Image (cartoon, rainbow, N blue to C red):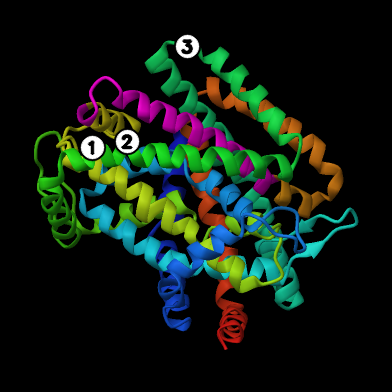
């Protein structure tokens, strides 16, 4: 088993190596400047579109607001709490700068994905809207590219059970067990039942729950983080100086921190940024394809806010709490580092902030990814797979909560990278469509 795990780790290091990271950021850079920085210039207008998108009578299954909340439910999770801490532990404070860079250009990637998702979505025999990379590859590219759609669907189905299900369930069980001493099997049962009540109702139920839980938990988490930040307000400029300085120089070993090279800051900043906001993986457009809208550009603007909210807001809050409380060089990593930071900044209640944040965020991630995986499986096997898929999904939750997931983590990492490759190829080939639709909307 150790030999298999070692081989898988080598594969993971390769697929998440320089080539993939350059592709992920490179496509974002290309789309950003190809759109003449449209995604940056229209951020505040996009917020207005999001607010207006709470209600819609246009064609689709869920409102534009619910589509974004469903997408955010899948992205706001362990990456925002444990992922940020891991990036700092492995790459130093400078990793946060590279997370920001990834997010700024990732906004264009998310925008392009959603534009294509609406432009090339399909309507099935029951009236449901289906879309995402497999559909814009199939309907937007020539037939000899169709194999990429199948590859994406296969990788997406497999990845969903790992990063979107078992890993999340394990994180919840571990956090709840550590803080409240609740047995893992009890957490597993509760999580499975709650997930079943939502998932068996399909995208309508998932979107409604996400539209309520995601904003409430995100706001609560941000408020607690801001409390810590404002209590250290005089040190905020120093924190930003540390981030910017470490982004371009080697971070020396200090305290329990082992030190980090410039390449480590870039690599782990970009990798954890992508892990958190999923820009380029092709997951979010599956949710946005179901939005009640007739305008691909408007939904694209709503979609790009997912990266803005996930990384530039929530991940930044987590990073500042870790740095300002002075625990970034403690030697802790992952959720333990975030817990230590919040416990230091908010004595007695900080640990609970992380636990409740992890629990709710992981739960909504399970809901969001269940829809992504289901759509990928349906593309491969048709509607007959939906019920078996949902039942298998629910069975995977307790298995993840009570299992040892070292190999599952690595396999999920590999599947995520493999999802990105066909999606990035499609974005590059269909970029003229993105530019044309955007230009048409502006003028």
Stretch of the chain drawn in magenta: 344-373
Q: Could you tell me how far apart the alpha carbons at marks 3 and 1 are, in whole angstroms? A: 28 Å
Q: Earlier in the sequence, mark 3 or mark 1?
A: 3
Place of residue 240 in the rendered image (x, y in percent of width and height, measured from the top left): 17, 55
Q: Residues within 10 Å of mark 1 (few under 14, many from 20)?
A: many
- Nearest to the observer: residue 174 or residue 363: 363
Label number found at residue 224: 2
Is residue 318 shown in magenta? no
Residue shown at the point (73%, 78%) measured from the top left: 142
Place of residue 234 in the rendered image (x, y in percent of width and height, measured from the top left): 10, 46
Res. 32 in view = yes
Residue 141 lies left or right of residue 252; in this view the side is right
Q: Earlier in the sequence, mark 2 or mark 3?
A: 3
Q: Is residue 437 above or below residue 283?
A: below
Q: Is residue 311 above or below residue 118?
A: above
Q: Is residue 261 above or below residue 230?
A: below
Q: Could you tell me how far apart the alpha carbons at marks 1 and 2 are, in whole angstroms? A: 7 Å
Residue shown at the point (46%, 49%) measured from the top left: 11
Place of residue 140 in the rendered image (x, y in percent of width and height, measured from the top left): 71, 75
Looking at the rendered image, the quarter that the C terminus falls into is bottom right
């Amino acid at each position: 088993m150790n030999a298999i795990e070692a081989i898988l780790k080598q594969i993971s290091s390769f697929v998440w190596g320089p080539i993939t990271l350059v592709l992920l950021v490179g496509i974002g850079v290309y789309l950003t400047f190809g759109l003449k920085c449209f995604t940056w210039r229209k951020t505040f207008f996009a917020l207005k579109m999001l607010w207006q998108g709470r209600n819609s009578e246009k064609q689709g299954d869920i409102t534009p607001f619910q589509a974004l909340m469903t997408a955010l439910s899948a992205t706001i999770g362990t990456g925002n709490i444990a992922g940020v801490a891991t990036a700092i532990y492995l790459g130093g404070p400078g990793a946060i700068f590279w997370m920001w860079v990834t997010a700024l250009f990732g906004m264009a990637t998310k925008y392009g994905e959603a534009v294509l998702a609406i432009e090339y979505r399909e309507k099935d025999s029951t009236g449901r809207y289906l879309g995402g990379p497999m559909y814009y590859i199939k309907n937007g590219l020539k037939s000899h590219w169709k194999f990429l759609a199948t590859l994406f669907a296969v990788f997406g189905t497999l990845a969903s059970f790992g990063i979107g299900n078992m890993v999340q369930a394990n994180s919840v069980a571990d956090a709840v067990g550590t803080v409240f001493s609740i047995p893992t099997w009890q957490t597993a049962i509760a999580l499975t039942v709650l997930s079943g009540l939502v998932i068996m109702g399909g995208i309508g139920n998932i979107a409604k729950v996400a539209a309520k839980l995601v904003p409430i938990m995100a706001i609560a988490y941000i408020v607690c983080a801001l409390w810590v930040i404002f209590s250290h307000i005089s040190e905020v400029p120093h924190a930003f100086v540390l981030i910017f300085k470490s982004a371009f120089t080697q971070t020396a070993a200090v305290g329990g921190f082992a030190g980090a090279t410039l390449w480590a800051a870039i690599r782990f900043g970009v990798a954890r940024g992508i892990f958190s906001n999923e820009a380029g993986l092709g997951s979010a457009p599956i949710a946005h394809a179901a939005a009640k809208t007739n305008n691909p550009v408007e939904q694209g603007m709503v979609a790009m806010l997912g990266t803005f909210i996930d990384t530039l807001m929530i991940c930044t809050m987590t990073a500042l709490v870790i740095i300002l409380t002075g625990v970034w060089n403690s030697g802790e990593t992952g959720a333990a580092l975030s817990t230590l930071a919040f416990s230091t900044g908010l004595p007695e209640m900080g640990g609970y902030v992380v636990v409740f944040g992890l629990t709710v965020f992981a739960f909504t991630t399970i809901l969001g990814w269940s829809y992504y995986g289901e759509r990928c499986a349906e593309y491969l096997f048709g509607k007959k797979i939906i019920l078996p898929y949902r039942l298998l999904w629910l069975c995977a939750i307790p298995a993840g909560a009570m299992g040892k997931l070292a190999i599952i983590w690595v396999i999920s990492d590999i599947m995520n990278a493999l999802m990105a490759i066909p999606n990035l190829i499609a974005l590059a080939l269909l970029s003229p469509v993105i530019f044309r639709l955007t230009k048409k909307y502006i003028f």
